[in-house]
Image: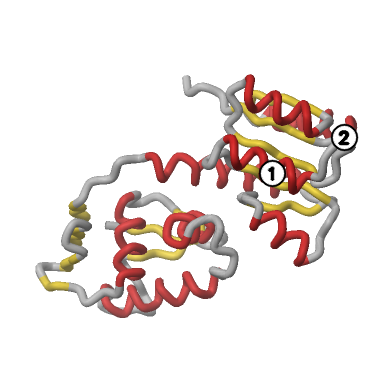
Amino acid sequence: MAEKKTLLLVDDDPDILTVLRGNLELSGYRVLTVGTAKEALETCQRDGVDLVVLDLVLPDMDGVQVCCRLREMDETLPIVMLTARDSVVDKVLGLECGADDYVVKPFEFLELQARIKACLRRREIPGEKLPERLERGPLVIDRASYKAWLNGKTLDLTKKEFDLLYFLASYPGQAMSREDIRHALWGKRQLYTWSRTIDVHIQHLRQKLERDPKNPELILTVPGVGYRLSA
């Protein structure tokens, strides 16, 4: 059985902590809760924490400062900000200080749960050692030479198209969300890579790979999620 992921919830509202802890424990997580920034920093230093859900308004330190401190302690620790502040400035500030995602109160638990899962998955992807050469049916991709072939024919790809194709081919049959793709290709601190940008790159790839780009057979759309490679 896989080891439970440990989540740290940081909020000065005990009611929110109680509700979230109960629901997340039912979802299979080990959950720690604290109400102050001091406790949050001490807990992360003392215990093994896989992800932090952090409120921006805390009694002893602003959540943005806490986020910056946590990021200094661990560059890869996923941090999800949970706050009533919903302005664009607040969101950008939170993301720029190192947060991986930003959830505005009031929120649906299922949305928060999905964002937590996505952040945990993205943390695991970069650590995997992927092969230099991938073969997926008629598709061959060589990362060392930055070349790719389909049915023996060399593909004329831009660097970003190559990176996107290599990323999808690294997880054949697995649906990768736009957030997974953004994080892998542009990095979590690139704030302005919108879904439309990713969709455009997918369209360009389909034009170069598919017999009929309007009815793709290799790069498939997963409704409500993102894309997957069928090969």
Rate crowding at label 2 as few (under 14), some (14 to 19) or many (20 or more) other CA atoms within 10 Å. some
Secondary element at image label 2: loop
Q: Nearer the viewer, residue 81 or 16?
A: 81
Mark 1: which amino acid?
Cys
| Mark 2 vs mark 1, CA separation in Å | 16 Å
Across and down, in percent, residue 165 comes to 32, 63
78 vs 47: above or below: below
21 vs 214: above or below: above
2 vs 199: above or below: above
Secondary element at image label 1: helix
Q: Residue at x 65, y 24 (%)?
A: 30
Question: If you read the primary sequence from the N terminus, does the residue marked by circle 2 or circle 1 appear first?
Answer: 2
Name the outermost residue toward the left: 152
Q: Quadrant of the C terminus?
A: bottom left
Can you tell which mark lies on residue 67?
1
Q: Nearer the viewer, residue 225 or 163?
A: 163
Across and down, in percent, residue 148 comes to 19, 66
Q: Residue at x 82, y 36 (%)?
A: 11
Q: Residue at x 59, y 40 (%)?
A: 72
Q: Are marks 2 and 1 in contact (CB under 8 Å)?
A: no
Q: Nearer the viewer, residue 108 or 212?
A: 108
Mark 2: which amino acid?
Asp
Of badges 2 and 1, nearer the viewer stands 1
Q: Quadrant of residue 207?
A: bottom left
The residue singled out by tag 2 in the image is 12
